[in-house]
Amino acid sequence: MSEVLKQDLSQEADSPDLFMIELLFEDKPALLEPEMVKAAAEEKFGEVDAVSTAGEMLSFAVKKYAVHFENGDVPPLAVLGQGLGFNSGEIGEFERYQLWDIQDVSELLDRCRYRCFITVMMGSAMEYKDRCELLMDWLECVLGLYPDCKAVWTPTAGKLLTPEQVMENSGNREVRFIRNCVNARFFNIDGTDGDMIVDTLGNYAIDLPDIQVHFCGLEVDDVVNYVYNMAFFFYITGETAHIGEVVDGLDENGEISTGVEWGCQFEDSLIQPARLVLDIAPGEYAAGTR
């Protein structure tokens, strides 16, 4: 890329209480009937209670994931917001340069004029894997009701996928959240002798660390695969509090190896949005200062 983009590190990433995913459309979709959505939700979750069925906002209490409080158990709400406009200008150049999964992405975005959104209310009180499982199941459920959906946008990750890609990821339930809602980004650093950064964006939204590698001399695709594998590891194990001073690195073949140790530490991100990341220094390939 020849254009130099300037970032804004005053933009902070806060773990959202409402994790929203947007479904984008070229033509305005008809409002779904509450009974139809409830029936689809019960096929996915079992027993649900309709909470809001008026107008453009539908919500359903999912009893399977009830959260225990002192005053009793409270089920989270699977929410669908319908009939909303979409302005493609909300997704700026900085974000568009990191949309790797769809060809002619700007053309697609600029054709989309409408959206709906899904979220889970009271999700922040849930264990993160349950929250992600509920959110992914709800996404797949709603996508099945919107055959005209053109793209799925996750703002917290800056990630855009086709509905087909989302459904292809449904087969591996253990890692579909990472595949759908975490983006690996790549940046050349202007004014340096080949310095690059690969990071993840999206783990922070469920209070897990994003990963950052500032390097020179490694194959970019190898580093992208590496940070995704690290994101999978943190999601599956939840082991973030016990991270030591080193993690497994890449060998000469670009494969993760227990025989290669790379230093790591938590620090502020180098790329917006500002957030705490696990910075991994890749040995002799490390760039910058730490």
Image (cartoon, rainbow, N blue to C red):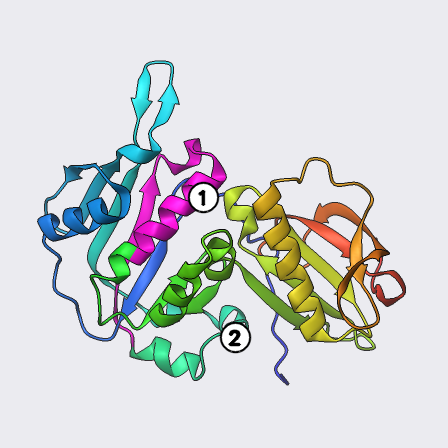
Q: Secondary structure at mark 1?
A: loop
Q: Residue flagged by tag 2: what amino acid is it?
A: Trp
Residue 154 visible somewhere in the drawing: no
Q: Nearer the viewer, residue 92 or 220?
A: 220
Q: On screen, 10 above or below 216?
A: above
Residue 261 at x, y percent in the picture: 85, 54
User: Which stretch appears magenta?
Assistant: 112-140
Residue drawn at x 55%, y 50% as measured from the top left: 203
Checking the image for residue 16, the label placed there is: 1
Residue 24 falls in which quadrant of the image?
bottom left
Residue 240 at x, y percent in the picture: 67, 40
Residue 168 at x, y percent in the picture: 41, 67
For disc 1, the neighbor class at 10 Å (few under 14, some 14 to 19, many from 20) is some
Q: Quadrant of the N terminus?
A: bottom right
Q: Earlier in the sequence, mark 2 or mark 1?
A: 1
Residue 116 falls in which quadrant of the image?
bottom left
Q: Is residue 232 left or right of residue 269?
A: left
Q: On screen, 116 above or below 43?
A: below
Residue drawn at x 41%, y 46% as measured from the top left: 133
**Residue furthest top as drawn:** 70
Residue drawn at x 42%, y 60% as measured from the top left: 171
Residue 151 magenta: no
Camera-nearest label, 2 or 1: 2
Rounded to the nearest angstrom, the CA distance separating label 2 from label 1 is 24 Å
Q: Badge 2 is on which residue?
A: 100
Q: On screen, 255 above or below 174?
A: below
